[in-house]
Amino acid sequence: MSLEPGLVKRSPPAKNAVMQPIYLDHNATTPIHPEVVRAMDHCYAAGHANPASQHRPGQRTRKVLEDARERLAELLGADPTGAQPDRLIFTSSATEANNLALLGIARAGGPEPGQVIISAIEHQSVIEPAEHLMEQGWDYDGLAVTSDGVVRTELLPGLLTEKARVVSVTLGNHDTGVLQPVGRLAAICNRAGVPLHTDAAQVVGKLPVSFRQLGVAAMSIGAHKFRGPLGIGALLVRHDVALKPLMFGGPHQWGRRPGTESLALAVGMLTALEIWQKDHEAQIRHLTALRDRFEQGLKAGAPEVIVHGAGAPRLPNTSNVAFPGPDGQVLLMALDLSGVACSVGSACSSGSMELSPVLRAMGLPNEIVARSLRFSLGTTTTEAEIDEAVRRILHVYRELGGGQPFGVL
């Protein structure tokens, strides 16, 4: 096969060669950074007290926790200390943050059912809370996307009614990596007096994000998406946004999320984001170059493959590719046996046999949707891994009978 300039043609490994694993599922989770582990170890070893306790050990722990909260908010472009301070609420995950945003903002508008609007390409942790509200008598409207997977901004004004309580649109899609015009959508919502929430879990730690510049009412993040620890996320909430709690049991975090905050997890999340912030421009260049190298390598060896959303702005690390011929689940399992870890979409829904709702919302036929896989790179991914992954993918693809363009199957 011919390769694009700069790509290396590799020979198949010997039969007894050890197949080194290649992890290309960083949108599901990323390996925790060693410096994050050390920072958390230091917290645990220090024997911190409960930050809600009134004694001096508790007060010292509270100071460290609040310093971490404030610094995180600042790194995310919020203002936690001004005359109208934004609030950063620690949660167990971005999923919990999304639930708190959708349900908490919607219900804060009053006891009567209203309207919730979300894009057609949201994560399950946004879709399911919206469906839950619909089951309780709420109006639930979806905002359509283009064939490239970009939300159709011009449709939002026509969907907003006097009953609208909350709008939610992801900042960067988990399946395709396509970035969304959240700033423009927020401007429309702000003029209408309707809060807009964005799920930024796939963008924070991959591209710069400024909460205040976006103009959103609330924003969710998850630490393990940017080499932080599992078990912690956060919801940023604008100073003027009302939020009903989902749980009850104490005055923690302005009474919006009870339970003792984990100092170690908070410090771990902050450390991961600070590490990314130090050299984020180099990391963005690195990931973009690897993503392009990966896609060029696949297209050089199999021109018939399709890269979804390639015509739109995307995350630097995400490629969603359709392979004509083999079923996507079959190809996924074959690649796993060949040491390449990828996915058929979000890890929260990959156990389902349902075709990707994101790709279907883009208007793609089932034939293409069913043969699509997501590859997501990380800062630990190397050029050598990309070249070897391309070789293995093309080999498995051919072994499974791929090679004909879509429509010729």
Image (spheres, rainbow, N blue to C red):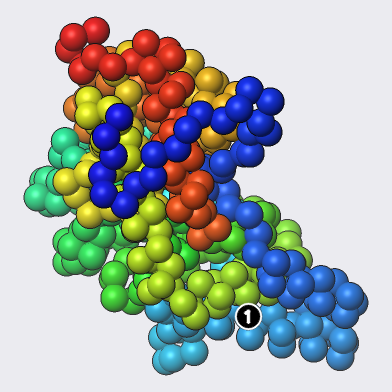
Dot 1: element: helix
Residue 340: image location, x then y, percent: 54, 34
Residue 83: image location, x then y, percent: 42, 92
The relative height of residue 39 versus residue 373 in the rendered view (above or below) is below
Residue at (43% x, 67% y) in the render: 283
The relative height of residue 136 versus residue 205 in the rendered view (above or below) is above
Quadrant showing the C terminus: top left
User: How packed is label 1: few (under 14 Cα within 10 Å), some, or many (20 or more)?
Assistant: some
Quadrant position of residue 338: top right
**Would residue 258 be found to the left or right of residue 124 on screen?**
right
The relative height of residue 162 versus residue 241 in the rendered view (above or below) is above
Front position in the image: 69 or 395: 395
Residue at (22% x, 54% y) in the render: 313
Q: Residue furthest top?
A: 409
Residue at (71% x, 87% y) in the render: 63
Residue at (81% x, 71% y) in the render: 41
**Would residue 21 be found to the left or right of residue 48 on screen?**
left
Front position in the image: 88 or 23: 23
**Would residue 132 be found to the left or right of residue 341 on screen?**
left
Front position in the image: 390 or 365: 390
Residue 274: image location, x then y, percent: 55, 77
Residue 294 in view: yes
Quadrant showing the N terminus: top left
Q: Amino acid at mark 1?
A: Ala
**Would residue 395 be found to the left or right of residue 158 on screen?**
right
Residue 199 in view: no
| Residue named by callout 1 | 68
Residue 130: image location, x then y, percent: 40, 39
